[in-house]
Image: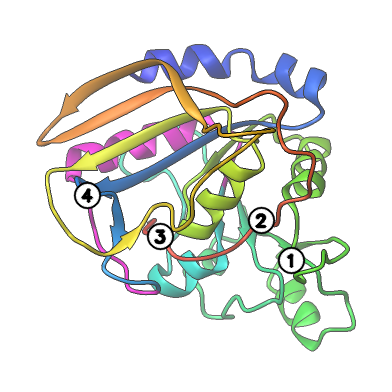
Amino acid sequence: MLSAVKGWLDEAEAFAARRGRPLVTLSYAQSMDGSLSLQRGQPLRLSSPSTMRLTHHLRALHDGILVGIGTVLADNPRLTVRLVRGAQPQAVILDSHLRLPLGAALLNQPDRPPWIATVESSQNPRWQALAERGVVLLSFAADSLGRVCWQELLPALSERGIRSLMVEGGAQVIQSLLTAALADQVVITIAPLFVGGLAVLEQPLILGQGLGFPAIERVACQRVGEDLVVWGKLRYPDPPPAQNVTAHAEDSVAS
């Protein structure tokens, strides 16, 4: 599986130059019934030690790793490569209104502080406090919902040298990224559990001019420990929806 993903990412620089945005890998763990956690804001460890190591391998293959502020508030992740040897990706947090706690684990990495995508400006009192901790703040105009949209964020990351981006959630981040038709490939860990909790997708994904759904092509799977890992390229209905979709920030589990 890693060789397949590495093969996709070997084209990341050319892809970014052609599309003006990073190559995006959507990666998350779910239960057999499609749950990410018990409920919003309540983390649930679904990856086994074997698939967690696999996740860290995947992180090392990407230039950047992105999660929403809900993930940070729920799980306080470090978003680093620790379980394997490899390069550290740049952490990017979707935090429209600068809710990142000053005690977050992400701020205890002075060699690679996180980037925050926000709609706030330097007039917000928390801006200076975060900047003093080394955080790089990227400000965007707010959309109608007061949030950052993918169509502005991804080109900005590409301009800063992020050619490949791994997106780990949470639920609304996954939903909005697929709705925007901007995830290029997926790696999904399926744990052999039934949870009945927060669904990966909370609304139907109907794209294009009629009934159409994102589909995985060249799909493959592999058993890793007791988990099943599924991966493949994403294909969207033609034409994709012409709309700005917000980069929502909700909960998932990352560490």
Mark in the foreground, 4 or 1:
4
User: Could you tell me which residue is drawn at 11 percent across and 33 percent down?
Assistant: 225
User: Could you tell me which residue is drawn at 28 percent across and 55 percent down?
Assistant: 35
- Please state the extent of the stretch shown in magenta in the rendering: 41-65
Q: In x, y percent, where is residue 118? A: 75, 66
Report the label total. Answer: 4
Q: In x, y percent, where is residue 62? A: 55, 32
Please give the residue where the numbered disc 4 appears in the rendered image: 33
Q: Which element carries disc 2, helix, strand or loop?
A: loop
Q: CA distance from mark 4 to mark 2?
A: 25 Å
Amino acid carrying label 1: it is Arg
User: Could you tell me which residue is drawn at 62 percent across and 37 percent down?
Assistant: 207
Q: Is residue 84 above or below residue 101?
A: above
Q: CA distance from mark 1 to mark 2?
A: 7 Å
Mark 1 or mark 2: whose residue is earlier in sequence: 1
Please give the residue where the numbered disc 1 appears in the rendered image: 147
Q: In x, y percent, where is residue 224? A: 17, 29
Q: Which element carries disc 1, helix, strand or loop?
A: loop
Mark in the foreground, 4 or 3:
4
Residue 87 drawn in magenta: no
Mark 4 or mark 1: whose residue is earlier in sequence: 4
